Image: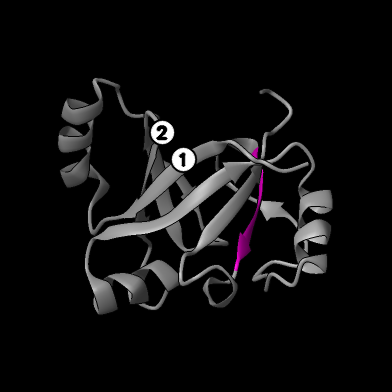
Amino acid sequence: MLPYPLDHVAVAVTSLEEAVPLFELLTGDSCSPVEELPSQGVRVLFVGSIELIEPLGPDTPVGRFLQKRGQGFHHIAYRVPDLSEALSRLREEGIDLIDETPRPGSRGHQVAFLHPRGTGGFLIELVQAGPTE
């Protein structure tokens, strides 16, 4: 059921190791361990509610994003209690989906993305917490 709370904001970077010190300084938080998500073509870590994403190569979605736009804001994520239900509801509301069904994301969560053409140009991720949260 809407509204959904903010889960995190993602920033695309060319190097996690180079970006971490700034975000740790700004947030006062320590970074999480790095996770590699080959299915999404990224390495990720979290510093508080900021997700830093680094491409595994230039021919990945985030690699192409960085080539086109450079480092910066990539997407905003909202926490949902039931991802399948949220996708169904948003589809009924006419929102274009990138992911028709949930897929594995970082931290053991299930995720799905909404297409920017249906969200005013913003890439939006929906996140359903994994079994440990």
Question: Quick one: 125 or 52, which is closer to the camera?
Answer: 125
Q: Quadrant of the N terminus?
A: top right
In the rendered image of this protein, does residue 21 appear above or below residue 92? above
Q: How far across and down, in percent of the image, does residue 17 sit? A: 21, 43
Write the residue at 77% across / 51% down: 86
Badge 1 amino acid? His
In the rendered image of this protein, does residue 32 appear above or below residue 122? above
In the rendered image of this protein, does residue 41 appear above or below residue 3? below
Badge 2 amino acid? Ser
Q: How far across and down, in percent of the image, does residue 106 sit? A: 55, 43
In the shown orientation, is residue 18 left or right of residue 61? Answer: left
In the shown orientation, is residue 9 left or right of residue 39? Answer: left
Residue 10 belongs to magenta span: no
The answer to whether mark 2 and mark 1 are in CB contact below 8 A is: yes
Dot 1, how many residues are within 10 Å of its Cα: few (below 14), some (14-19), or many (20+)? some
Q: Secondary structure at mark 2?
A: loop
Q: How far across and down, in percent of the image, does residue 20 sit? A: 22, 37
Q: Secondary structure at mark 1?
A: strand
Dot 2, how many residues are within 10 Å of its Cα: few (below 14), some (14-19), or many (20+)? some
Q: Quadrant of residue 127?
A: top right
On residue 49, which mark appears?
Answer: 2
In the shown orientation, is residue 41 left or right of residue 57? Answer: right
Q: Which residues are magenta?
A: 109-114
Determine which residue is flagged by label 1. 8
Q: How far across and down, in percent of the image, does residue 38 sit? A: 52, 59
Of mark 2 and mark 1, the one earlier in the sequence is 1
Residue 111 belongs to magenta span: yes
Q: Quadrant of the C terminus?
A: top right
Question: Quick one: 28 or 37, which is closer to the camera?
Answer: 28
Write the residue at 63% across / 50% down: 126
Write the residue at 39% across / 78% down: 59
Distance between mark 2 and mark 1 Cα atoms = 5 Å
